[in-house]
Amino acid sequence: MTADELKRLAAARALEEVRDGMIVGLGTGSTARHFVELLGERVRAGLSVTGIPTSEATRADAERCGVPLGDVDAVVRLDLTVDGADEIDPELRLIKGGGGALLREKVIASASNRMIVIADESKWVKTLGAFALPIEVVPFGIAATGAAVTQALRVCGAAGPFALRQTRDGHAFVTDGGHWILDARLGRIDHPERLAASLNAIPGVVEHGLFLDLATAVILAGADGIRFVERRGRRAEGALA
């Protein structure tokens, strides 16, 4: 099966966790788009849900698929969020933000009773860091913020080059919130919690792509079928070796 077919399989399994009347966070990216499309089919068949999109792109997808949307500013708690990830480790720690929606994704995930991550098995890694870590920053004072990020990476033993994310025409990529993204190519992150705390302490950093203690379960699709991995405290059950 192709990677896209595996993503759709994972999305279909996540749909089994959706119940009538739920408020559901809708993730961003190619895998999450499959979930939105399948959810739209269920809505047309009579399922009643309220979707909360994590990006303007997902909002457009949800509207196209007929998924009813709620006002994010009026929602205190969500029942469930379904989203993809760029990397997942055995403790269900994630790197997210390849699509540039990490801030809104983390806001919605943090406000959810459950976060289910859907992915093909290639996203499962022993150690985070091969995928570039997105760091969302305000444009104001970018030189000072960049220097502080460099120091934080070095102190945490995750030193590596980073670059301002750009669009195809060479301009700075701008998030839905009006921010820029620095992509740090670290190779590996041995201490994700320590690095997250250091980045959180930098005033110019709005958010980063380390999603820690947020995913409650992961649905991995691979050649051998679907694997449902659930987090119990700091331990994941049903995980791949």
Image (cartoon, rainbow, N blue to C red):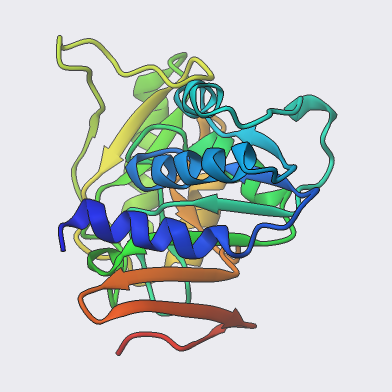
Q: In the image shown, does 167 or 72 lie closer to the viewer?
A: 72
22 relative to 231, above or below: above
Q: Total marks drawn?
A: 0
230 relative to 98, above or below: below
Q: Is residue 194 visible?
A: no
The residue at 30%/78% (across/down) is 225
Q: In this view, does 5 lie to the left or right of 219?
A: left
Image-quadrant location for residue 6: bottom left
**Looking at the image, which residue sits at the far front?**
45
Q: In the image shown, does 85 or 191 lie closer to the viewer?
A: 85
164 relative to 186, above or below: above
Relative image position of residue 191 (x, y in whole percent): 41, 70
Image-quadrant location for residue 233: bottom right
Q: Is residue 5 left or right of residue 200?
A: left
Relative image position of residue 89 (x, y in whole percent): 37, 72
Relative image position of residue 237 (x, y in whole percent): 51, 89
Q: Is residue 58 visible?
A: yes
Q: In this view, does 236 lie to the left or right of 76?
A: left
The residue at 48%/79% (across/down) is 229
Q: In the image shown, does 45 or 195 lie closer to the viewer?
A: 45
209 relative to 234, above or below: above
Relative image position of residue 35 (x, y in whole percent): 47, 47
